[in-house]
Image (cartoon, rainbow, N blue to C red):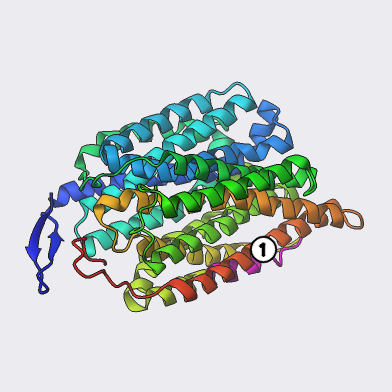
Amino acid sequence: MPQYEEGATGASTAVADPVPNHRLGIATWVIAFARFLVVLDGTIMIVALPSIQSALKISPSELNWVINAYSLTFGGLMLIAGRVGDVYGRKRVFSVGLVLFGAASLLGGLAPTGGALIVFRAVQGIGAAIATPGALSLLVATFPEGKPRTRALGLYGGMTGLASVMGLILGGVLTTYAGWRWVLLVNVPVIIGVLLGVNALDEGEPAEQAKIDIPGAITATLGAGSLVYAVDRVGEHGWSDAMVVGCLIASAVLLVAFVVIQRTGRTPMIPREVVSDRGRVGANIVTLLMATGSFATYFFLTLYMQQVLGYSALRTGLMYLPLAVGFGIAAGGVGPRLLARTSEKAALSLALALAAAGTAWFSFLTAHSSVYGMMMPASLVTGLGLGATVVVSTGIGVRGIDSSEAGIGSALLTAGSQIGGALGLAGLATVAVTTTRHAAKGTALSDALVHGYTAGFKIAVGLFLLGIVVSLLTITPFVRPRGSAAQQPR
């Protein structure tokens, strides 16, 4: 429990009790590994998709749902899961989510059919949604303000970006040497290890008089799901398809209803205090835009290497090493230093500019591009930009949030990341398929495929540039409301 002392203005401010260093060390790695696993599973399946399709006889139209089933339940249920943790206890809910995630990983690794795999991937996403808000809120509650929390947030943000890239590498290695089922089964022993360290975490303060906003949860989840399903279906059936039109209309109605509920309800899922700061809102928008562009970029690069260059799953995974190195450098040094030496607005804008530059480099790929002269340097620059963006946007997204509301605050960031990833895979894949179909009429298949992929890269660049505009318009220095008893920001 934190102690309180009188400030210069007479308002009481929270002062965290000292925490033993060894306990902080355990807590750091518990949170880091939990975060690493749930993000890893958003991308680890991508390199394994061709093997999964061949083994389980999944149709091309269903293949995206091996990824999207996870992303959709993960992102769609994130908000209600964050509030559940605030109400019923973060360590308890965190542990339940990890157990469900591990069980679904085991069952998914043993799935006999494509339909069963998709179902277990959806359940996996539910477990990730339950566990993830608790991870960041437990971090806020466990680590005292200042350098300890800054370092922990840097590691948390770094794990977020690094895991998305390492998923591509590990997916290739495991698929080649152990079989695609091990991209899921490998989670089980790690989950057991994480659960053994949960007691090192601090529960934090409960949210006062918090309740679960059931109408808000239903409208948010169904609205996001309808949107992703509609965009995914466009690639095969076109925009005039009745189901596509119906889902788009349903999505618009449900999401508008969600906004109305949040503005007028007595116990909204997203407390008004959480979204009262423009900078936090901007960081969440940037996170969604970045995820939309980056997930699609990974998807197109994987297809380019396997379908155009003819790489094996192992070589494809290893080709992501420069991207992983860029993420690691950004998380370990570039991101935190940007925050320390420049304004938050400048740091986020520069990080997004690096991501846009690297992705724009990919848009010049051809069927005969040089691996060392183009692929690897473009991957390094993209990794630096995306890694720094994750670290900076995470820091801004949770700045000034009281520990009692940390669950829902962190849930917003992760929901944006997962929903953005699902939209990126569905929407940009549709653009790529359509472009490839038109290009195939007068060119070789490999060239037509590259036309489609580079069209997707260009849209991803546009999303990163839009993120810069959002950051310039929304990120302002944080000013704590007078009399607030919340912990001071970084």
Residue 107, given in percent of the width and then of the height, sits at: 49, 24
Q: In this view of the protein, can residue 446 be seen by the observer?
A: no
Q: Which residue occupies 65% across, 41% down?
A: 64
Q: Quadrant of residue 45?
A: top right
In this orientation, which residue lies closer to the viewer: 323 or 257?
257
Helix, strand or loop under label 1: helix
Residue extending furthest toward the right: 442
Q: Which residue occupies 40% across, 30% down?
A: 100
Q: Is residue 398 above or below residue 87?
A: below
Q: Is residue 357 magenta?
A: yes
Left or right of 226 on screen, residue 345: left
Residue 195, given in percent of the width and then of the height, sits at: 29, 34
Q: Is residue 256 above or below residue 396?
A: above
Residue 293, given in percent of the width and then of the height, sits at: 59, 59
Residue type at numbered disc 1: Ile
In this orientation, which residue lies closer to the viewer: 294 or 202?
202
Left or right of 114 on screen, residue 417: left
In this orientation, which residue lies closer to the viewer: 265 or 429?
265
Q: Count up the numbered dots.
A: 1
Residue extending furthest toward the top: 112
Q: Is residue 400 above or below residue 185?
A: below
Instruction: Check disc 1 and report the residue beneath it.
Output: 459
Q: Which residues are magenta?
A: 353-366
Residue 313, given in percent of the width and then of the height, sits at: 62, 42
Quadrant including the C terminus: bottom left
Crowdedness near tag 1: few (<14), some (14–19) or many (≥20) residues, C-alpha within 10 Å? many
In this orientation, which residue lies closer to the viewer: 316 or 416?
416
Left or right of 215 on screen, residue 247: right
Name the magenta segment's main secondary structure: helix
Q: Is residue 66 magenta?
A: no
